[in-house]
Amino acid sequence: MHASSRFQGRSAGLGLALLSAFAFGGSGVAAKPLIEAGLDPLHVVWLRVAGAALIMLPVAWRHRNLVRERPALLAGFGLFAVAGVQAFYFASISRIPVGVALLVEYLAPALVLGWVRFVQRRPVTRAAAVGVVLAVGGLACVVEVWAGLSFDLLGLLLALGAACCQVGYFVLSDHGGQDGRSGDGAEPPHPVGVIAYGLVVGAAVLTVVARPWGMDWALLGGSAGMNGDEVPAWLLLGWIVLLATVLAYATGVVSVRMLSPQVAGVVACLEAVIATGLAWVLLGEHLSAPQLIGGFVVLTGAFIAQSAAPKPPSGPVAAGAGTGAVAGPVEDELSHGRAPH
């Protein structure tokens, strides 16, 4: 009976993880037609984040104690994981294909390992180093370096900026998580509460940066072209807010708790595959054979880097209720594999 319940739990977790990967992977496909219809990328980001923040306000109110207990963590999450990643990613897909932008962002695990090795001066495993080499080599195929970077250089730099913002989120989560697991007995922050406040903070930051009062709101009442077909703009916006943000984050958090970090990391890597496939079918963005091979190598390297992330220095670490020793926060975050799109 117990084994059957555990199997059902893992099956449900895999289903939620797949749903989250599909939801996250579709954000760029839904956003690009709106951008091409005339909306500024920053305005699309603001609409996405502000809409999701409005929906998540009840969750933020329920976890309002986080404002007092973890103000730096909430501010950093909102600035990097929400505002920074979203703004750079959406700006990049306005200039380069969705699949390429997301594959560039998957350099984040490799960049985190660089931070661990050269800034924190902690050793990394040989497998992790191999993962970094594979990710960088695969990226060279994706951007076709032999053709002199045939893609827009600014678009590639913007995608790299999204990856760097994701690194900032991982590092901040490491600091916040270790605070939560310190010897003072404090509980780690609730992940859904952090997501809710991250969206609220991100919306506030993006309101100042994007200045939505200057947006052409009439465009939302029209339609946007998607590979030759006209789709209502409000439908694409609803896709971005409800599916690619609220549903994606919620199902992702729940699935990670139901699965092992390694399994969650494997499923999360499907996000880039899903995004590339959806962009191929819905936007007509076809990638060449070398780019597809390079994308596979990038994902392979990213997964190896995720699963081989180094543990923190040994020492007394508070364990969760009913569990053994808790792995380091950076390792957990990398194994979860979530690129917050």
Image (cartoon, rainbow, N blue to C red):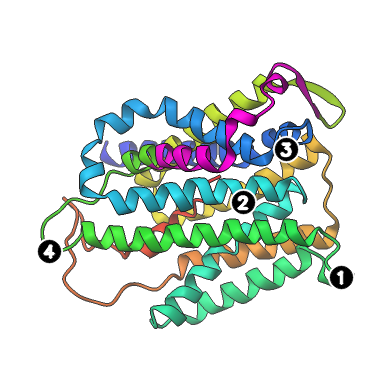
Q: In this view, does 93 lie to the left or right of 315?
A: right
Please report the residue visible at 26 percent of the width from the left and 39 percent of the height from the top.
2
- The residue closer to the viewer here, 91 or 26, is 91
For marks 2 and 4, give the CA distance.
38 Å
- Amino acid type of disc 3? Lys
Q: What element carries label 1?
A: loop
- Give x and y (percent) for residue 33: 75, 33
- Amino acid type of disc 4? Gly
In the rendered structure, find residue 148 and report the number of the disc placed on it. 1
Please report the residue visible at 58 percent of the width from the left and 77 percent of the height from the top.
130
- Residue that lies at the very extreme toward the left in this rendered image: 184
Magenta stretch, residue numbers: 198-225
Foreground disc of the pair 2, 1:
2
For marks 4 and 1, give the CA distance.
53 Å
Residue 310 seen in this snapshot = yes
Foreground disc of the pair 3, 4:
3
Q: Is mark 3 on a helix, strand or loop?
A: helix
Q: In this view, does 100 lie to the left or right of 179?
A: right
Foreground disc of the pair 4, 1:
1
Q: How would you classify the magenta stretch by its main secondary structure?
A: helix
Whether tag 2 and tag 4 are in contact, CB under 8 A, the answer is no
Q: Is residue 220 magenta?
A: yes
Query: On the image, numbered disc 3 is attached to which residue?
Result: 32
Q: What element carries label 4?
A: loop
